[in-house]
Image (cartoon, grey):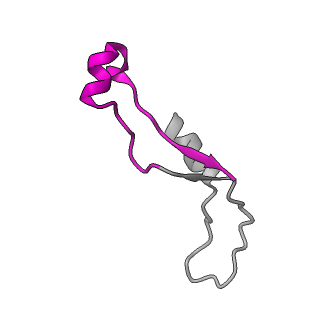
Amino acid sequence: MVKSSFLEYEGKCTCPPDFPVCKCGREKRAEIITKKVVRPGLEEISSNPRSKNARLRVLEKL
């Protein structure tokens, strides 16, 4: 659910690569900072057991 929303906000062009100019009109509204999820380290898990299942994804709004 989060990944699909992030990809939608990233707004990549859907035009074929051989087009010299973008015609689809999609605008980039955000940039994905982390390509993979960031998971807590062993130190974080030992100090906070509830963080064991945490997943962090980062998106920067433009």
- Say whether residue 3 is left or right of residue 26: left
* 27 w.r.t. 30: above or below: below
Residue at image x 58%, y 75%? 16
Place residue 17 in its image quadrant: bottom right
Residue at image x 27%, y 26%? 43
x%, y% of residue 20? Answer: 65, 85
Residue at image x 61%, y 48%? 60
In this rendering, the count of numbered labels is 0
Place residue 47 in its image quadrant: top left
Residue at image x 52%, y 36%? 2
Residue 51 part of the magenta-drawn span: yes
- Say whether residue 50 is left or right of residue 16: left
Image: magenta residue range? 34-62
Q: Nearer the viewer, residue 61 or 12?
A: 61
Residue 44 part of the magenta-drawn span: yes
Q: Nearer the viewer, residue 31 or 6?
A: 31
